[in-house]
Image (spheres, rainbow, N blue to C red):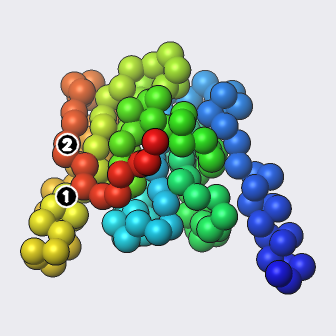
């Protein structure tokens, strides 16, 4: 293994933090699961990056639960999150079941209220039967309602993707 690869891996591992290390008073937390060997997870990264550009940094903590830390994230993906969490037990304890999956919390997951649970959009519905193209943008629509000051009720949608193994 080349020295640059080792240094890059050490930097990545050193920057991964557990959710218990989050010290923030932001009103919302957005948490997402990701693993590089799930095609739907990789496909969703572009959708996430588009969403992340419009999330006010002073209002949303952004957590990423990574299934395998030995495969580095892209620099853009890593930079779009405040915390990278390597403990999938923590993700499972919050109700995450698939890669990719997203949750929005009012406050912190440990003490807040779950507002949204599901996929970023419906692009994975019918995978293998039709071309993967979204026509419902669940998270974008939910975040728009939050930014407008609305108080939307809990929303959940069926998640398609790779299962998080126990």
Figure disc tally: 2
Q: Quadrant of residue 12?
A: bottom right
Q: Which of marks 1 and 2 precedes in the sequence?
A: 1
* Residue occupying image coordinates x 18% and y 69%: 127
Tell me the SS state at disc 1: loop
Q: Is residue 90 visible?
A: yes
Above-or-below relation of 142 to 49 = above
Q: Horizontal placement of 110 versus 154: left or right?
A: right
Name of the residue lying farthest toward the bottom: 2
Image coordinates for residue 49, horizontal then vertical, percent: 46, 63
* Residue occupying image coordinates x 66% and y 28%: 20
Image coordinates for residue 154, horizontal then vertical, percent: 24, 27
Q: Horizontal placement of 75 versus 130: left or right?
A: right
Depth check: give the residue in front, 123 or 107.
Answer: 123
Q: Horizontal placement of 142 versus 72: left or right?
A: left
Q: CA distance from mark 2 to mark 1?
A: 9 Å
Q: Are marks 2 and 1 in contact (CB under 8 Å)?
A: yes
> Would you call the spot at circle 2 few (<14 residues within 10 Å), some (14-19), or many (20 or more)?
few
Checking the image for residue 134, the label placed there is none
> Would you call the spot at circle 1 few (<14 residues within 10 Å), some (14-19), or many (20 or more)?
some
Depth check: give the residue in front, 17 or 3.
Answer: 3
Image coordinates for residue 5, horizontal then vertical, percent: 80, 77
* Residue occupying image coordinates x 81% and y 61%: 11
Depth check: give the residue in front, 110 or 54.
Answer: 110
Checking the image for residue 122, the label placed there is 1
Q: Which residue is mark 2?
A: 157
Image coordinates for residue 108, horizontal then vertical, percent: 52, 25
Q: For the N terminus, which image quadrant?
A: bottom right
* Residue occupying image coordinates x 75% and y 55%: 13
Q: Is residue 82 visible?
A: no
Name of the residue lying farthest toward the top: 111
Tell me the SS state at disc 2: loop
């Amino acid at each position: 293994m080349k020295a640059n690869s080792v240094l890059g891996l050490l930097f990545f591992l050193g920057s991964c933090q557990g959710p218990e290390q989050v010290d923030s008073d932001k009103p919302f937390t957005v948490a997402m699961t990701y693993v590089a060997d799930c095609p739907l997870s990789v496909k969703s990264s572009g959708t996430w990056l588009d969403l992340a550009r419009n999330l006010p940094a002073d209002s949303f903590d952004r957590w990423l639960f990574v299934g395998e830390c030995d495969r580095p994230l892209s620099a853009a993906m890593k930079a779009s999150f405040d915390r990278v969490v390597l403990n999938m037990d923590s993700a499972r304890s919050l109700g995450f079941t698939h890669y990719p999956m997203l949750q929005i919390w009012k406050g912190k997951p440990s003490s807040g209220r779950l507002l949204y649970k599901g996929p970023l959009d419906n692009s994975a519905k019918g995978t293998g039967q039709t071309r993967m193209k979204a026509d419902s943008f669940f998270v974008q629509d939910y975040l728009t309602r939050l930014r407008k000051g609305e108080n939307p009720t809990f929303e959940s949608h069926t998640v398609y993707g790779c299962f998080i193994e126990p």
